Each structure stands twice: as structure tokens, then as C-alpha cells.
Amino acid sequence: MENIIAVKSYAFAIRIIKLYKFLSEEKKEYVLSKQLLRSGTAVGALVKEAEHAQSKADFLNKMNIGLKEANETEYWLMLLKDTDYISKNEFDSINKDCSEILRLLVSIVKTTKTTLGR
């Protein structure tokens, strides 16, 4: 069975890397784009780590941190839009993916908490 969050977070990381390249090469923006690169690629890395978590609690911890990173990524995307580094259309396109990942992670975290009795 395909791991939807792993597939989507990996594809999202690729989009983030391409956006980072655009921002640094075309827009000469290095500070916000570096933050975006770090948080946007961390989501997929944490999801990948969670695949081999030592316990359900460890899995929950990794997914929770992934959720925080996705939330932070949304913040950087909003900031880049509102400072005119990316257009509203560019923002809408990539933020749609970010929002979907956020919804998936919230669901995974809630479900895992329930199975752990938290």
C-alpha cells in the first residue's frame, strides 16, 4: 500500500527546492527562502524517519514535529507572498499542497494519539 503522506511530502519537498532555487537565483532573496527550504524539506524527512520509529510514541513525536514544520512552512510562504517575492498564483498553487499535508498530518497525529490513549 502506498504511503500517501510520504509521497506527498516528498513531492512537496521537490517543489520547495525548486522555489528556493527560483527565489535565490531570480529574486536574489536568501534569508526567507533559506528558512522555507529548511522547514519545507524537513516535513518529508520527518515522515521518512517515522516509517522506522522505535515505538508508537516515537512515531507520534516525529509526526508532531513534521506538523510543526509544515505549519512553519505555511508561514514562510505567506510572508513571501505578502512581500511580493511570489505571486498570489504561485502561492495558491504551492500552499494548496502545504494545506493538504497539514490536514493529513493533523489526522495522523489525532489518530495516533487516540490509539495511544492520549
Image (cartoon, rainbow, N blue to C red):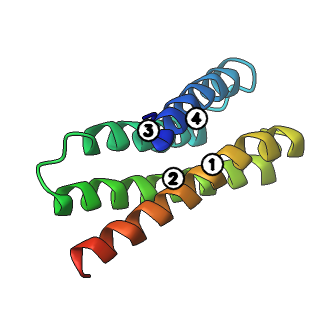
Q: CA distance from mark 1 to mark 4?
A: 7 Å
* Figure quadrant of residue 110: bottom left
Q: Position of residue 84 (x, y in %)?
A: 83, 44
Q: Residue at 88% across / 41% down in the picture?
A: 89
User: Which residue type carries mark 1?
Assistant: Cys
Q: Earlier in the sequence, mark 2 or mark 4?
A: 4
Q: Residue at 67% across / 44% down in the picture?
A: 97
Q: CA distance from mark 3 to mark 2?
A: 18 Å
Q: Earlier in the sequence, mark 4 or mark 3?
A: 3
Q: Earlier in the sequence, mark 1 or mark 4?
A: 4
Element under disc 4: helix
According to the picture, the residue beneath numbered tag 1 turns out to be 98
Q: Position of residue 60 (x, y in %)?
A: 28, 61
User: Which residue type carries mark 2?
Assistant: Ala
According to the picture, the residue beneath numbered tag 3 turns out to be 3
Labels 2 and 1 touching (C-beta < 8 A): yes
Q: Position of residue 76 (x, y in %)?
A: 61, 51
Quadrant of the frame with the N terminus: top left
Q: Residue at 62% across / 54% down in the picture?
A: 74
Element under disc 1: helix
According to the picture, the residue beneath numbered tag 4 turns out to be 12
Labels 4 and 3 touching (C-beta < 8 A): no
Labels 1 and 4 touching (C-beta < 8 A): yes
According to the picture, the residue beneath numbered tag 2 turns out to be 70
* Figure quadrant of residue 94: top right
> Foreground residue, 51 or 66?
51
Q: Earlier in the sequence, mark 3 or mark 2?
A: 3
Neighbourhood count class around disc 3 (C-alpha, 10 Å): few under 14, some 14–19, many 20 upward = few
Drawn side of residue 115 relative to residue 100, left or right: left
Element under disc 2: helix
Drawn side of residue 59 relative to residue 48, left or right: left
Neighbourhood count class around disc 1 (C-alpha, 10 Å): few under 14, some 14–19, many 20 upward = many
